[in-house]
Image (cartoon, helix red, strand yellow):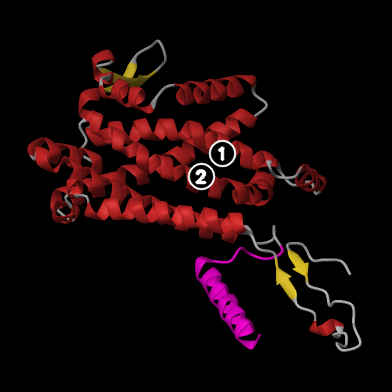
Amino acid sequence: MSEPPGATVTLAQSPTADEPSKPLSAQRVVPLRRHGRWIATAVVLVLVAQFVHGLVTNPFYQWDRWGYWFLRPTILDGLVITLEVAAYSAVLGLIGGIVLALARLSKSPVLRAVSWTYVWALRSVPLIVVLIFLYNFSALYKTLSVGVPFGPAFFSFDESRLATDMVVAVVGLSLNEAAYAAEVVRGGILSVDQGQHEAAAALGLPKGYQFRKIVFPQALRSIIPNYVNQLIGLIKGTSLVFYVSLLDLFGSAQTMGSTYPGDIVPLLLVVTVWYLLLTSVVSVIQFYVERHYARGATRSLPPTPLQKLRTGLTELRARIRKEAAV
């Protein structure tokens, strides 16, 4: 009799005159003991318990001051600015990424070269350098004008008045985000099977219609989950706008830390918890977006955390009943 993987079968011994043989249905399958797994689990639990104990009992963290600062109006105002910058940059970055991806996939060598150069440059330059450069952009160009190239200008405006701290932060993050979003969008478009393009062309559909109705909807299955994952990096990247004089969540905590030097650690913990909450929300959104676009690509949708919990409890009750019956 073949053994199932991960289990050993206790077979009945040879029958004797005094002990009749057991039927096959009475033979018991004994699960294989995995001692290494239990040892590793115990070590990890001990380490986690020590970490939590030190985090809670160490007076250096000053959790009472953390509770004082967590919902202070200064911190919440900075949180609102962080959300605004992240939202504007996410939308503008995605739009710019779509334009750059289409330019990269076009048949025009000029568009391909310009798009490739932009993506290469913005992914190579650190974000903090881009923000500081834009913050000092008025030193290079005091006025900006729109008109005929190398000819007269129709109108001009003062760049320093237009480039507020919020505008500089959003433009800098959007330019950086567009470079990464372009690769996400391009990869999503290239992931569509070539047979879809050929089938659409065989039907005589216009190129624009093919892209809008056939190619791009299928590409969204790959684009949206990956770009939602990109938003996590964008939210953390908003902490750099403090260096262009915009008091976001991190900037507000940094300013309060300068005023109250004894509360630097609690303020940093406040920022840490808020970023953990924001990225956790985005992670939940990412899970459900991926689950939504998995329809039609997998035989069954991945279970939600609540469904996993229900399944685990059901299996645990069944195991307990089985052990009690034995």
On the picture, is 197 further left or further right than 147? Answer: right
Q: Secondary structure at mark 1?
A: helix
Residue placed most toward the observer, 113 or 252: 252
Q: Which residue sits at x=42%, y=40%?
A: 233
Residue 316 forms part of the magenta stretch: yes
Q: Taking the image as drawn, is residue 112 in sight?
A: yes
Report the quarter where the C terminus lies: bottom right
Residue 318: horizontal and vertical position, in percent?
A: 61, 81
Q: Which residues are magenta?
A: 299-326
How many numbered circles are shown?
Answer: 2
Three-letter residue code for mark 2: Tyr
Q: Quick check: can you spot residue 158?
A: no
Residue under the point 90% across and 83% down: 16
Q: In front: 216, or 21? A: 21
Magenta stretch, main secondary structure, is helix
Give above or below for 173 relative to 12. Answer: above
Q: Which residue shows up at 65% across the image and 63% down it? A: 33
Q: Residue reaching furthest front?
A: 18
> Disc 2 to disc 1, how far (Cα)?
7 Å
Which residue bears the numbered disc 1? 184
Residue farthest to the left, as pictured: 259
The correct choice, above or below, for 52 with respect to 231 in the image is: below
